[in-house]
Amino acid sequence: MAKAEREKEEIHVPGTMALVFIFFAWFATFYFLAWWVLSGAWVIR
Amino acid sequence: MAPSIESQFRTCAVTGLKVHLPAQRLILANAVAAVVFLLVGGILALLIGLTRWPAVQLLPADLYYRFVTAHGINMLVFWIVFFEVAGLYFGGAVLLNARLVQPGLAWIAFILMVAGALLTDWIVFAGKADVMFTAYVPMKADPLFYLGIILFAVGAIVAVSLFFATIIVAKAEGRTSGSVPLVTFGLLTAAIIALFTLLAGAITFIPTFFWSLGWIPTFDPGVYRVLFWAFGHPAQQVNLAAMVSVWYALTALTVGATPINEKLSRTAFVLYILFINLGSMHHLLVDPGLSSPNRIFNTSYFMYLAVLGSMIHAFSIPAGVEVAQRAKGYTRGLFEWLKKAPWGDPGFSAAALSFVIFGFLGGTSGVIIGTMQPNINVHNTLRVPGHFHATVVAGTTLAFMGLTYYVIPLIARREIVGKAWAKYQPYIYAMGIILMILGMNFSGMLGIPRRTWDISYAGAPLAVKFPESVYTTLGLVGIGAAIAVLGLLIFVGIAVASLLFGKKRA
């Protein structure tokens, strides 16, 4: 690949990267919260 | 002498696209039909939401189940598919500067779809098909119910086939060369999934129709469930692919965003075609008729490859917006590009809200309940509608609403009436939907069943008791539904007023 083409491929999107991390943090929280609630709140005793 | 093909085109003053006039009329007809069925489904949504709120419990039991059936079919099938057909004609003909092949056949398809939809609605409202959207065998509806769905599906198959033919003819006539635009490519994946979906629907409903007529003595319920979900969930994947295409279209129209890596975005669409239909098996995660490896492999492995596609779009679309905004000089800090985005443009705000709610609430909840163990706990609870209202109602419907604000001026050539209302409409709708989704999710987590008229099971021999907090969470469902329907009515009002009274554009 030519140098000019490589440079064209370099994209600066720090804000989107931050949004991606926020999303993963949310997902992890939501996912484990669901496990925690479901494992305790709805068990046949 | 027949008029030349070129006389059937006009050039759009805004986009420079050549618009095939017969295609334009068909786009409008399908979009208007879509909005009419959205209105029907929306009014039913309000009545259902106010019935699930125990403090109100508006409808009697029989009407409740009837309206849940009608709501599901009008929203998940009629509104969405009519709008998607409008989208396919737009992506196939207008975006390629091409003619729509066989407009006469497209009108026959439209008439079949309208006739099928009206027949189905008539039978449901007449109380002859209280079988829910899923219509699980051995519950039997009036044969005309199945016939209505079959007519609608045949019309939709013809429309999808015309979209494929339009792309092939556009290439053959030299209207377009090379790869089709990304939006058309996304719609092409939606159309491929739609063809699979509609054929699966035919395999499901034609024997069911014969069974309801007594021509077939029995229909195995286990086989029906597998066949139904080869139709029912892929139908939502059509929405997914179409919605993502609309996100790309709206971010391009509103901020001039282009995909940061078009090949990657196209690959993500292909992942949908390859894997997402296998993920449909998640509807049967607690079905005793299928082996566990089959269910787990399809949902907890193949489904994630489709989710990977969504993750790629989830990065690519905001990154495209960020690149476009930074190029305009909004480069301060991490988020100036986002703050200075056109939040007052309903096309942009609808796309952004649809994107966020779909991802943060719909996608995540889908992945969680697509896993066997949580699914065992929440299956058939309100958690499930909590998931799919985030994907289809907040995601697809909101995105399609956003596109409508551009379809009206560009295709109907009318100015939007009530621009101030349009500015706030996506926010009102989204706020209602978020409240409703959260209410549904929390209620479901606490064990509240879906589709059930009376959660106290009054008169049942074995009492079922839920935590007191469900009365709050179910109240959220009712309040959220009311706000969302208000947003929906504002949308319909703006769309109708603009089409009828909007100032004509050149």
Image: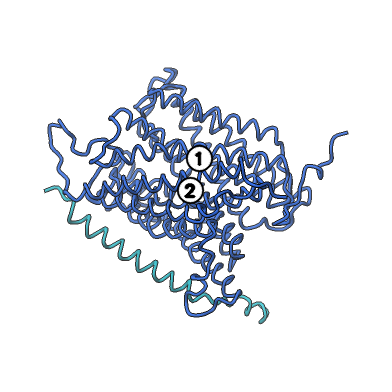
How far across and down, in percent of the image, does residue B298 sit? 40, 50
In the rendered view, tell whether residue A43 sits above or below residue B105: below
Q: Is residue B6 left or right of residue B217?
A: right
- Residue type marked 2: Thr
How far across and down, in percent of the image, does residue A26 sit? 35, 65
Residue that lies at the very extreme toward the right in this rendered image: B1
Residue at 41% over, 44% down:
B485
Whether residue B273 is visible: no
Q: Chain of mark 2?
A: B
Chain A: give its colour: cyan
How far across and down, in percent of the image, does residue B8 sit? 78, 42
Q: Nearer the viewer, residue B351 or B286?
A: B351
Q: Is residue B209 left or right of residue B31?
A: left
In the rendered view, tell whether residue B281 sits above or below residue A25: above
Chain B: give its colour: blue
Residue at 65% over, 33% down:
B107
Q: Where is residue B247, by image quadrant? A: bottom right
Q: Which secondary structure, mark 2?
A: helix
Q: Are marks 2 and 1 on the same chain?
A: yes
* Residue matched to label 2: B397
Q: Chain of mark 1?
A: B
3D distance between C-alphas at marks 2 and 1: 9 Å
Residue at 61% over, 33% down:
B110
* Residue matched to label 1: B79
Residue that lies at the very extreme toward the bottom in this rendered image: A3
Q: Nearer the viewer, residue B268 or B152?
A: B152
Q: Is residue B87 left or right of residue B339?
A: right
- Residue type marked 1: Trp
Q: Which secondary structure, mark 1?
A: helix
How far across and down, in percent of the image, does residue B182 sit? 62, 58
